[in-house]
Amino acid sequence: MTHFMFNITADEPIANFAFLGTIVGYNFVKYDALARAKKREMRNELKLIALLSFISLLGVAYYFFQLELITQAVSVAVLLLTLLYTLPFFPNRKNARNWAGVKIYIVALCWVGVTLVLPLLNADVPLGFDFFLKCIQRFILVFVLILIFEILDLANDDPHLKTVPQQIGVKRTKYAGLLLLIPFYFLEFLKNNFIEEQLIVNGILVIALSLFLAFANEKRQKYYTSFWVESIPIFWWLMVVFF
């Protein structure tokens, strides 16, 4: 998507680095504490996940050394942000995932870093005005997506997390998400490289996101987010291919 929007030719090293790095990062965040706490009780499923993560880590290392130096430096910064999200670096403090209200911003920043900043840096694309607009749009998109997850997880989340729905309520969270989609759409008009088809794509995307946000509640089945909401970026990509 980023390659298409900025007219970048296919870049296999950065694509594979991002793909394999996502597998490693996600599995580390999700399963690290569980694996360390229950080493003797690791089920076969967890062992397979650990093996997949290790193989992916080897791939990450291989492609890392094919990236530009500046891309490597920024990717290390994203890695540190991921580790901060998972591991308790500071004495008497929990990891950043459990810091009040911080989780949603760290996840959105990691998304922007991996899917937007790294590909542009590696392709030596000047980071001009369009880049900063796209960073804001991508951040808003991920932020709204996470709001849907936080609404569904409201009943199970630790109150100390202080997620957006915990702090302002479900109704206001939905209003906030819907309001954020307004600048997401209209920032497209400010781009120097203005593409009319992108307005159609973004319009359909805004409608889909609005509906998912509006109908989100704590009683929805897990597939509401783990399948349907998770598939929105794929749906977005298919629209770009179609138009």
Image (spheres, rainbow, N blue to C red):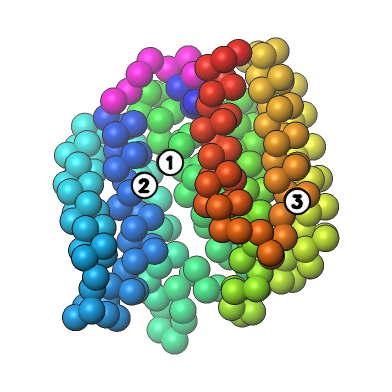
Q: Which residues are magenta?
A: 4-12
Which residue sits at x=27%, y=80%?
Answer: 38
CA gap between label 2 and label 1 equals 9 Å
Sequence-wise, which precedes: disc 2 or disc 1?
2
- Prevailing secondary structure class for the magenta stretch in the rendered image: loop
Earlier along the polypeptide chain: callout 2 or callout 3? 2
- Locate residue 141 relative to residue 127 in the image: left or right: right
> Percent x, y for residue 29?
38, 62
At label 3, the amino acid type is Phe
Q: Seen in the image, is 189 located left or right of residue 156? A: right
Tell me the element at label 2.
helix
Whether 33 is drawn above or below 77: the answer is below
Q: Is residue 65 above or below residue 221?
A: above
Observer able to see residue 34: yes
Q: Are marks 2 and 1 in contact (CB under 8 Å)?
A: yes
**In the image, residue 200 lies at what x, y percent?**
71, 19
Question: Which quadrant of the figure contains the C terminus?
Answer: top right
Residue at point 17%, 39% (across, down): 62
In the rendered image, which residue does mark 2 sit on?
A: 22
Residue depth check, mark 2 versus mark 3: number of the one nearer the observer = 3
Which quadrant of the figure has residue 195?
top right
Q: Residues within 10 Å of mark 1 (few under 14, many from 20)?
A: many
Question: Tag 3 or tag 1, which sits nearer the N-term?
Answer: 1
Residue at the disc numbered 1: 114
How packed is label 3: few (under 14 Cα within 10 Å), some, or many (20 or more)?
few
- Residue 54 rendering spot, x and y as whole percentages: 19, 54
Where is mark 3, residue-wise?
Answer: 215
Q: Nearer the viewer, residue 194 or 121?
A: 194
* 3D distance between C-alphas at marks 1 and 3: 30 Å
- Does 70 appear in magenta? no
Which of discs 1 and 3 lies nearer the camera? The answer is 3
Pointer 2 local density, CA inside 10 Å: few below 14, some 14–19, many at least 20: some
